[in-house]
Amino acid sequence: MTPAPASPDVTVTVIVHNDAERLPRAVASLQRQSHPNIEIVISDDHSTDATPRVARELAARDDRVTYLRLPRNSGGCSAPRNRAIDIARAPFLMFLDSDDELPERAVESLLAAHGERPVDFVMGAVERVRVDTGRTSTWMPHLVAEHRTVAGIEAEPALLFEHLATSKMYRKSFLDDHALRFPEGIHYEDQLFSAQAYCLAKAFTVIPEPVYRWYIEPYGAAEAASISNQRHKLSNVRDRVHVQGLIDAFLEQSGHQSLRDAKDYKFLKHDFRMYAGDLPFRDETWLRGFADIVNPYLAGLSEDAYARLPRAERVVLQLVRDGRLDEAQVAARGLGHGVGPRALAEDADGRVYWGARVPATPAARRELDLTDLGLDSRPFPSAQFRHEITRLEPAPGAALALTVRTYDPGRRLPMGPQVASLVVAPGRRRLTTRFRLDPVRPGVYEGEAVLDLSRAPVPPDGFAGTRHPLIQLTDGRLRNSGILLAPLAFPRLTARVPYRSGTAPHRVTAEPEGRGAGRLQLTWAPVGVTSRVLGPLARRVAGEQGSRVRRAARLVGSVLR
């Protein structure tokens, strides 16, 4: 048993509610810290599963662990954190959620930065880990790329984007002197707490080392998802907008009105943008409710904040504000992918606007004006087309029959039939299916293609992964590649394909992507001997080859030195 330190350097609070399965992993990440002189407080928001038993067992095995149980469920993260702050014995505080972890050197790295100079808190990088794929990325990497001390948030207002309370180590006296606690009874408490901490801090340090490991489960059960992932609930929208109003009030009361533009931009670029990507998947009732909640708040945001956004995001925002909600769904499917509109409208001055009609108000004309995008003149490889599947059904064998409609708002394609290619690559080699696009009317083409998945060149050891087919168009020697939007309602289609004369069978699934643009999505999964033998064998051989290459590289390097 590890004895409890008489005077711990850092108190780390692990908040938990009905998460008995993952709590031990979170606590184990603290027990592995390279700086062991810590106090661990498990703060339980009145769990009703096995969490109390698991927490008590963890405390019994390590004297550094204290178990705190709230007498009733608070429904959020604030109360369990605040109760733990009240009993914390260390001069520095950190916070960990039960479904996440701390990297092994997190406490050491943050504490060392506190030792460099007196600051109110230190913040570091956050590793995001996709539970479904294992892929890792860094949250807001540009904000934490450089080790530095910031003399007040006014010096770097862009840091408002990093609103996580869990990526920071706070000086407890800073929190106590300002009576700074997490607001109870509301969601998105991190955003208000972090905005207050940024504004109240005289100085804080940023380090590039990873200090938090955040597990992302995008396809988890909706009701079990974290609060930030429950965007399908209008109450979630209401909570997010409510906390923005609280932040606005705090900025005004504390004399930080100069941060309002930066904070408004953060809301539009981050908070609203998260909902915008979901708009294509919402029904009419939800869309009307969403607009009723966000539009009064959007009306009060600064014009400068809107002007900083990419034009595609401004279009979606304006369509929501104008109540053109079905069109907002269409526009939202292009976010982040350079997808053109279905149509453009031109005014008497030659300016072009998103949609089939010239907007009625000056504000709408300003936000929906696409003239500067140069849709009729930009280089062909970056020209913005829009490719939509209007019909998709199974064909004989493992084939898909589909009708593709291509919109050419900039009129970049000559009138007459066009040769297009449907391209997908399960592995290193591509499957290319050519088909003809015939003009339907000016700026609109349509064609039929048969995508035979049995011809896909899967590697000998199989392929396990997801691909999104592209549509390619050509202009002489120039090529343009664009995403293929799927009908969002078509049912999943699955076929077993006996690749390589049956020696490499796979299960292939076609379905609409369940988020974002809603692209056509194809997933390959090896079955039979491919999954049991060939794949693992190939990965082992590749690993051994890679190890030999690395050893050879080290040998060459030592000789050259």
Image (cartoon, grey):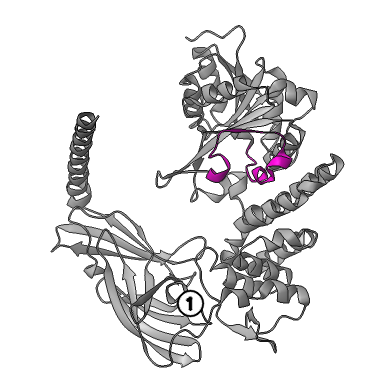
Count neighbours of disc 1 (C-alpha within 10 A) and say few if under 14, some if 14 to 19, many if 20 or more. Answer: many
- In the rendered image, the quadrant that contains the C terminus is top left
Q: Residue furthest front?
A: 561
| Image position, residue 137 (x, y; %) | 46, 44
Q: Is residue 157 magenta?
A: yes
Q: Which residues are magenta?
A: 141-164
**Residue ID for mark 1:** 385
- Is residue 67 left or right of 108 when viewed as pictured? right
Q: Residue at x 72, y 77 (%)?
A: 365
Give the quadrant of residue 351: bottom right
> Height in image: 213 above or below 86?
below
> Height in image: 192 above or below 169?
below
| Image position, residue 329 (x, y; %) | 60, 70
> Height in image: 190 above or below 444?
above
- Is residue 522 left or right of 114 when viewed as pictured? left
- Is residue 460 left or right of 306 when viewed as pictured? left
| Image position, residue 114 (x, y; %) | 62, 22
Q: Residue at x 79, y 23 (%)?
A: 177
Q: Residue at x 42, y 86 (%)?
A: 446
Q: Give the amino acid type for the residue marked by disc 1 in the picture.
A: Phe
The residue tagged with tag 1: helix, strand or loop? loop
